[in-house]
Structure formats: C-alpha cells, structure tokens
C-alpha cells in the first residue's frame, strides 16, 4: 500500500486537538484529566492504555454462581425494589431473576437516582462481585446496563480497566466514563490512525497495523488480537526510544571528531609481548579490540565498559592508555576516591617503570609544591599519564594534549563532570567509562543506548567462587572463631559496617562499638586491627589502609569506604555487619573485595532475626549467586529502574506500555531493528521510512520522546 493511503481519511492534526473539544468532556472533566492523568489532547487519551482487562465473554446463570467467583455478569430482570432499614442508614434492594433463580442487587448510596432510573421487568446485564449470604447471592453496587444497549455498544468481551486515581473516581470519572470517552474518540476519528511504522518493519515482524493495534488495545475483539496489539505497541514504544538513542550516537559520531590513533606502537607492543603479567581473558581481548577500533576511527570514543568486580578492567584501561601514548598523546585515569586512586597509581606506576613512562598521582591531598610540578609537566607534555580523583577536574589542570580520559566507577561522577573533562583541551579526548556495577542489559540499552557498551563477562581463570553464608547475630561467637582460624592460616579479614547518611552519628557509634568488641576478641599484640571510616582525615585513612595492604594488620574494620575497589589478594573473609541494611549492588561490591587471591574466600552476611521481605530476598540472592548481572536483575526488580539509575534517568519510568523488567526480548528486537534501519538509511530519507521520519518528527515536536530521554 502506498504510504499516503495510511493517512487517507484522516486529518493528521486531529489527534493534537485539545481534550476539551471531545464530546462528553466539559471544563471540569478536562481539568481533572489534565491534572490527574496528564491528558491534554486526543492523542494523550488514545495513549492511555488499560492496565488490565476483565473477561466479559462469560455470562453466568444465577444457578451457576459459586462462592468463590470473582466479578460476574448476569443477564436478568428486576422484578421488585424495596428499601430496607438497617442499623445505620438504609439499603436499596432489587430482586433480580433469570430463568434459573433469583438473587439481589444492593445499593447503600445514591438511592434516589437509582430508584428513579431502574426499570422493572426489562432485561439487564448486571456486573460486579457476587457475595454469598443466607443461601443466596447479591451484587453490591453492580454496573447495570440494559441488555439492548449492552449489545449495541462498541464493546468487547475483554473489558479494559484504565489507570485511575482516587480523585478521578470520586469525581465520577469512573472506568465506565473513561471507556465512554474512548468510544467517542474512536467515533470522531473514525478509528483511523496514521501508520507509525514502516511497511518493511510491519511485514518482517508480522505486526498488526497501527489502527488495528490501537483499536484492539482499547476494544479487544479477542485474546489473540489483544496480544498482537500489545506486542505491536510495546515494540513501537521501545523502537522509537532506541531509534532516538542510536540517532544521538550517530550524530555524536559524525559531529564530534576525535583524534584518530592510527598506530599501535612500541609502548603497546613491548608491554603486550614482554610484560603482560598474565594471559588476557577472551573477554578482555574482545573489549580491547572494540576500544582499539573506536580509537582508530575518526570519531570521538564514548564507551561504557561494564565488568564485574575482579574481572580485570585495570589492565584494559592501562593497555588503552598505551595506545594513546603510542600516538603521542597524554592519558588520564580518574577514580572516585583517594584510596582507589592510590591503588590504581600503585599498580599502574609499577607497570610504567618497565616502559619508562612518566606517571603522577593528583588528589585532594597532593601538596601545593607537588601540584605545581604536575601542572607544569602536564602543560609541557613531559608528564604522560595522570591518575587521581576529582582533583583532575580543577581548572588549573591543563593537559598539553589529552587523548584519552578513563573514568572508573562512573555512577559516582555526574555526566556534567564527564563533559567537563572533554573540554580540557582543544578537541575532546576519547572517553572510556568503567563501571563495576553491572546495569541490567535491558536498562543499559534503554538509558545508555547513546553510549557504546563493552562488557567483560568472564573472570580471570582459577578464581574460586566465594562461599557466601548468612548468619544471625546470635552466632557471632562462631563467626569470631572462624575468623581466628583464618588468621591462623595467615589470611586477612574485612569487617564492614553500614554507613548511611541520615543516621551517620548512630552508625558511627555502631562502628565504634563493633570495633571495641572486635578488639576485645582479638587483643594486641597478637592481633593488629586497622580501622577506616568516613570521618577520618585522608592521610590517616591512607595510613591505616597501607598497614592492611602491607599485611601489618590482620583485620580491617571499616565502613563502606572500602566498597569501591581496594585490592588485597590475601584478604579471604568479608564479614558484613547489619547486612540487611545494604542494597544488593553494595553487598555485591563488598563481596568483590575478597576472592582476589588463590585462597578459598568467604563472605559472611550478619543480620538480626527481623528481616523484611526485601531484605530476605537480597540475602537469599547473595548466597545463591555471584553473577553480577543476575544480581543486578534482582536489584532492578526490587527497586525499580528509577531508583537504580537515579533521578537523572527517571525518564525510563515513563514507559506507557512496555515494561523493562518483562519486555527485555522485545527491547532487543526493537534495538536491532532500529540499528538496521539507521544503518541502511541514516537520515530516514527513503520513501518506505517516511512513517518513521514523520512519527519521529512529530514526537520531537510534541516532546513525547523527551519523556523517555533527557
Ligand atoms: P576490576 O575489574 O575489579 O577493576 P582488577 O583490574 O582490579 O579488576 O583485577 C582484579 C585482579 O585480577 C587483579 O589482581 C588483576 O591483576 C587480576 N587479573 C586481571 N586480569 C587477569 C587475567 N586475565 N588473568 C589473571 N589475573 C588477572
Ligand atoms: Mg577496579
């Protein structure tokens, strides 16, 4: 069918008509619809999709009614009406009969109107919940409709139940009213809606047309058509989000040029061939290839690297930085905490020594004199690598030619900070963002669709699974004994306490009480204990950390400051106190601190007896699996996408019909089709893609798309 026919008989702007103009919507209703449901136009009403459907294919005979029936509908006649006095007020009771028996319809309110309007001995359809009492059934406040009207209605067997609010139903905008408005809308538009997907997509995915989908979502003709309508609309919703994200990515690539790193040179080759401390995993190699291909192209790299704790992101970062150095550029690595920057610096400067590369550390506690030297060396280009914290973002830090910026643990830095880094230099450097907090794939595809994503989904070989157990506080003595045995074997122990901002003082006390009881149990001089918490000066923290790293202390008592990445391979036990108070991803991060060496490692989750349902799920998940992606999926289910991504990305919550938790498969398909379409026709200029272009333009114009992405 030629595209134009899709639009025939329809004024394309009709759907932008203000809702006030719809017959049946007066100023009051218009106001409520706008305020309560955000419905401003015909289009908005059309996109109010039902939450669920009631099956109205079945009509019950009175004799068939069962005590456990849910909603039922019964065809019958009212033969008698009476008022019955009761303790408080009155009730109106109608006797309702069919050929098999008799039952009652009951009203506790609105008697006058009902009494005046009920017709005796005319066939009705009564719908509602049937209660059993005194050997009979009654339906309180039934939906009641004359059989004749019922049959004439543009109504389907599956009755939609629309989203509503208390205010709406209290103001008389019931589900039935909304259904009525929807019917009116379909009359005024003649149920014809412009096709919004291309014929190619419709054909290859065997989708129902837009008009058919929209009709069936509101007035399902049967279960099968409803399912097909739902699929098509979910696909469409996810498809346009992906199209938008991929377009952004394309535009970014074509507009934002990056320095092409053409050469793989001496630094990379020498290190790779002579100094690699281990064989790279397949996943590490694959990710390096992806990065290499980005860096070799003419576009600025904008890549997210996801890899579980311990999956070996650091070496990937280092090898990528060598690619920059080989092309005469500088590189930097930014980490969210001082401790983590120091750790990176220690590891990386070790490797740099072998290649004679100059590298410095810049953090909040760098001395002014050190800073001056670093600033100068950065500007004259004699300093090749810079590692540090937010301090890297200060205005005084100017690179001669920054070619690659790597950011570890991206969720701690805002996007604004990220872009600030880009503009340090004349041209933006390539950006690699590394995160150890796996984001479920479905979510990543929706919110990071404009970044390229690499995943390290394989742990280095020989890593033993961490044995994770749950222990109640009452078993503490046994846990202490276990710790003592491990120390006897030469291992080190973490004991972590929660620190949540709102109750910082309380948590601090918990930590100190905990520390004292640990100190009593493990007395000096036989045992040495480090303690690290947020209220300490950076230098003191660093000192305590170093004692633990060097093995001078056997136990590290800490708040969650150690969450993000210290590497002490000899530590084999992670005890998490009040584990019920930690989120899943935090627990997973903490557990990742052990299991870094050759020894069997353990994670002990200590809790009180009282656990909420969610806390139980979290603990159960932790003891069952160590797969970061699986844990992230559970986390997503428990907390919802908004919570996980923070408010910035809460737009993903505004999906109208698709559900990120359930529709991951459709999302994948939508993404791959969006990708294919743009690959073939990046500007959507081909005739067959006209519906896509038009819809996209329309969405942008009316800002629908910005609900999803902002
Ligand atoms: P993360 O991804 O959490 O940053 P790291 O880069 O700190 O992980 O790596 C964790 C540990 O695994 C380090 O001690 C590192 O040297 C080691 N490692 C990384 N890759 C490999 C590999 N391919 N084979 C063996 N050990 C590796
Ligand atoms: Mg790391």
Image (cartoon, rainbow, N blue to C red):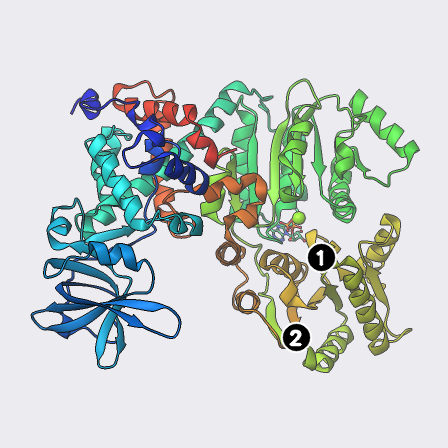
Q: Is residue 335 above or below residue 160?
A: above
Residue 99 position within the rendered picture, expressed as x and y whole percent measured from the top left? 7, 70
Q: Is residue 598 above or below residue 33?
A: below
Q: Judge by depth and name the residue closer to the eye, 615 or 524.
A: 615
**Label 2 CB, ligand 1: below 8 Å?**
no
- Mark 1 near mark 2, Cβ–Cβ under 8 Å? no
Which numbered dot is residue 551?
A: none
Residue 488 position within the rendered picture, expressed as x and y whole percent measured from the top left? 77, 76
Residue highlighted by disc 1: 500
Q: Residue at x 23, y 48 (%)?
A: 226
37 lies left or right of 462: left
513 lies left or right of 657: right
Q: Residue at x 52, y 30 (%)?
A: 293
Residue highlighted by disc 2: 608
Q: State whether residue 54 appears in this view.
A: yes
656 lies left or right of 561: left
- Label 2, secondary structure: give it: loop
């Amino acid at each position: 069918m030629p595209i134009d026919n899709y639009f025939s008989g329809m004024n394309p702007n009709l759907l932008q008509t203000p809702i006030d103009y719809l017959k049946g919507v007066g100023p009051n209703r218009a106001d409520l619809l706008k305020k309560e449901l955000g419905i401003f136009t015909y289009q908005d009403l059309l996109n109010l999709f039902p939450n669920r459907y009631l099956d109205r294919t079945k009509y019950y005979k009175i004799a068939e009614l069962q005590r456990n029936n849910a909603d039922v509908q019964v065809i019958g006649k009212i033969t008698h009406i009476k008022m019955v006095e009761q303790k408080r007020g009155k009730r109106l009771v109608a006797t309702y009969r069919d050929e098999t028996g008799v039952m009652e319809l009951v009203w506790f309110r609105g008697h006058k109107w009902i009494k005046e309007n009920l017709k005796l001995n005319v066939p009705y359809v009564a719908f509602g919940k049937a209660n059993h009492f005194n050997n009979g059934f009654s339906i309180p406040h039934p939906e009641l409709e004359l059989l004749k009207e019922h049959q004439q209605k543009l109504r389907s067997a599956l009755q939609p139940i629309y989203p509503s609010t208390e205010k709406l139903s209290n103001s008389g905008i019931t589900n039935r009213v909304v259904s009525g408005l929807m019917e009116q809308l379909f009359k005024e538009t003649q149920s014809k809606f412009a096709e919004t997907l291309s014929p190619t997509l419709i054909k290859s995915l065997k989708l129902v047309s837009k008009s058919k989908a929209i009709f069936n979502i509101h007035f399902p003709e049967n279960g099968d058509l409803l399912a097909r309508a739902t699929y098509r609309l979910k696909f469409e919703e996810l498809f346009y989000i992906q199209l938008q994200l991929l377009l952004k990515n394309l535009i970014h690539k074509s507009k934002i040029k990056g320095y092409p790193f053409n050469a793989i040179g001496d630094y990379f080759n020498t290190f790779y061939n002579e100094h690699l401390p281990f064989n790279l995993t397949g996943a590490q190699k694959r990710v390096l290839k992806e990065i290499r291909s980005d860096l070799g192209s003419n576009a600025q790299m904008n890549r997210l690297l996801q890899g579980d704790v311990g999956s070996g992101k650091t070496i990937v970062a280092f090898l990528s930085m060598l690619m920059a150095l080989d092309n005469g550029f500088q590189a930097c690595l930014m980490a969210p905490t001082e401790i983590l920057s120091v750790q990176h610096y220690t590891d990386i400067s070790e490797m740099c020594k072998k290649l004679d590369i100059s590298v410095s550390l810049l953090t909040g506690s760098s001395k002014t004199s050190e800073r001056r030297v670093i600033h100068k060396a950065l500007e004259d280009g004699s300093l090749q690598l810079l590692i540090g914290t937010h301090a890297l973002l200060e205005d005084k830090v100017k690179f001669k030619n920054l070619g690659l910026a790597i950011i570890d643990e991206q969720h701690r830095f805002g996007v604004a900070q990220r872009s600030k880094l880009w503009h340090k230099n004349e041209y933006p450097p390539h950006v690699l963002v590394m995160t150890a907090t796996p984001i479920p794939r479905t979510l990543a595809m929706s919110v990071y669709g404009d970044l390229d994503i690499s995943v390290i989904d394989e742990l280095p070989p020989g890593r033993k699974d961490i044995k994770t157990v749950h222990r109640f506080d009452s078993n503490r003595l046994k846990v202490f004994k276990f710790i003592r045995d491990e120390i006897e074997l030469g291992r080190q122990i973490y004991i972590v306490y929660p620190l949540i901002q709102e109750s910082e003082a309380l948590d601090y006390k918990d930590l100190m009480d905990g520390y004292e009881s640990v100190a009593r149990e493990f007395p000096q001089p036989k045992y040495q204990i480090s303690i690290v918490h947020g209220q300490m000066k950076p230098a003191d923290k660093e000192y305590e950390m170093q004692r633990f790293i060097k093995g001078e202390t056997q136990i590290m008592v800490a708040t969650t400051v150690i969450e993000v990445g210290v590497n002490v391979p000899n530590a084999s036990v992670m005890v998490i106190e009040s584990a019920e108070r930690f989120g899943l991803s935090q627990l997973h991060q903490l557990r990742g601190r052990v299991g870094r060496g050759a020894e069997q490692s353990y994670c002990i989750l200590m809790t009180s007896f009282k656990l909420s349902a969610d806390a139980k799920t979290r603990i159960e998940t932790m003891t069952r699996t160590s797969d970061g992606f699986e844990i992230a999926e559970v986390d997503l289910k428990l907390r919802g996408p908004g919570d996980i991504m923070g408010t910035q990305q809460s737009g993903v919550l505004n999906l109208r019909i698709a559900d990120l938790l359930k529709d991951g498969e459709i999302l994948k398909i939508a993404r791959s089709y969006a990708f294919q379409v743009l690959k073939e026709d990046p500007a959507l200029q081909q005739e067959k893609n006209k519906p896509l272009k038009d819809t996209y333009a329309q969405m942008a114009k009316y800002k629908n798309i910005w609900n999803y992405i902002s």
